Amino acid sequence: MLNQIKDLHKQIKEISAASAQQAEELRIKYLGQKGIVKHLFDQFKQLSKEEKKSIGAPLNILKKEVQEKIEALKQQFESHTNVSSSASKDLTLPGSDSFKGSIHPIWATKQQICEIFSKMGFCLSEGPEVEDDWHNFTALNFPEHHPARDMQDTFFVDNNKGYSLRTHTSSVQVRVMENQKPPIKTISPGRVYRNEAISARSHCFFHQIEGLYIDEKVSFASLKQTLLTFAQEFFGAETKIRLRPSYFPFTEPSAEMDVSCFICKQEGCNICKYSGWVEILGCGMVDPNVLSNCGIDSETYSGYAFGMGIERMTMLKYQINDIRLFYENDQRFLSQFKTL
Ligand code: PHE
């Protein structure tokens, strides 16, 4: 019987199957009810106690080997079946599209504006969104009873009006002037908050980008040239600009800047309200009081500042007529900006 076991041991190593069917036939031949292994176990039962002792272990090992070999043969065809079934699929069919995100239009516009100014030597600065009275108002020359200091216009975060959500990014310019020595040439993008009713044209929060340049002999002419370069980079090389006198507490003189309507080329359309001009930003020479408030000698240094709304720039550029669309995260709107 030991010889029989040895022979089977050799045999089992060599068996192979060409199909799942053949593997099953081998299973029946060796492990089935009337199979070879079963037959050996039947014979084993007839042996004497002594013989059982020497045959038991080799017989059990053989059984295990046979089981493992048959299992391996079967598995080989199981994986083979999977491959062949996937091969029968039509690989030329178009796949299901996976969802790809896109850059938010506000972020894309912010990036574009920052890039234009960084080419002109401006560096980037940021500041906190919860701001104290000094940085948001007082240092910027806001008179005590200025309407912006009113609850109706500003979100205060404490009852003493000590802290508020910043109403403009001009607060960052104060922080930069307090901490750096001229020459200063910086832009500060960020989110700002105003206590306004939400409509298609205004929101209680939006994004601004503010520019500041301080050095000896900084002139209004230099401000105008910088803004013209920016407008032509952003809206197109043929863009013209116009400055209208205005008022801001922190700049003197102050101006508002219009660009020639890039939609109708000044023929007249509803974006420029048939005037040929579109207002885009506020600007001016930094008031000497503001320089002194921030520890900068206003006799030696002068500077200019400008500020614009990023939503407004984006709405003009892509002719979007409702500011609320930016904050609703509606894929039908956002996916239109995939190429940005
Ligand atoms: N901070 C002004 C605003 O919020 C914009 C501005 C910035 C105007 C700098 C002049 C100079 O409207």
Image: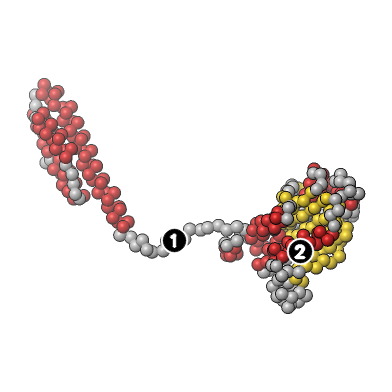
Q: Give yes or no for contact between labels 1 and 2 (Cβ–Cβ under 8 Å).
A: no
Quadrant of the image containing the C terminus: bottom right
Comparing 221 with 1, the one in front is 221
Asked if the residue at label 1 sits under 8 Å from ligand 1, the reply is no
Q: Amino acid at mark 1?
A: Ser
* Residue found at the far top of this picture: 50
Q: Nearer the viewer, mark 1 or mark 2?
A: 2
Q: Secondary structure at mark 1?
A: loop
Q: Secondary structure at mark 2?
A: helix
Residue 67 shows in the view: yes
- Say which residue label 2 marks: 228
Indicate the amino acid at tag 2: Leu
Q: For residue 239, what is the image quadrant?
A: bottom right
Q: Which residue: 70% across, 63% down?
A: 233
Residue 150 x %, y %: 84, 55
For image coordinates 32% across by 56% down, the residue present is 86
Q: Residue at x 14, y 23 (%)?
A: 53
Q: Residue furthest right?
A: 299
Question: At which x and y percent is residue 268?
Answer: 74, 77
Query: Image point 30% across, 56% down: which residue?
Result: 85
Left or right of 10 in this view: 208: right
Disc 1 target residue: 96
Q: Where is residue 293 shown, x and y percent of the image?
A: 87, 47
Q: CA distance from mark 1 to mark 2?
A: 47 Å
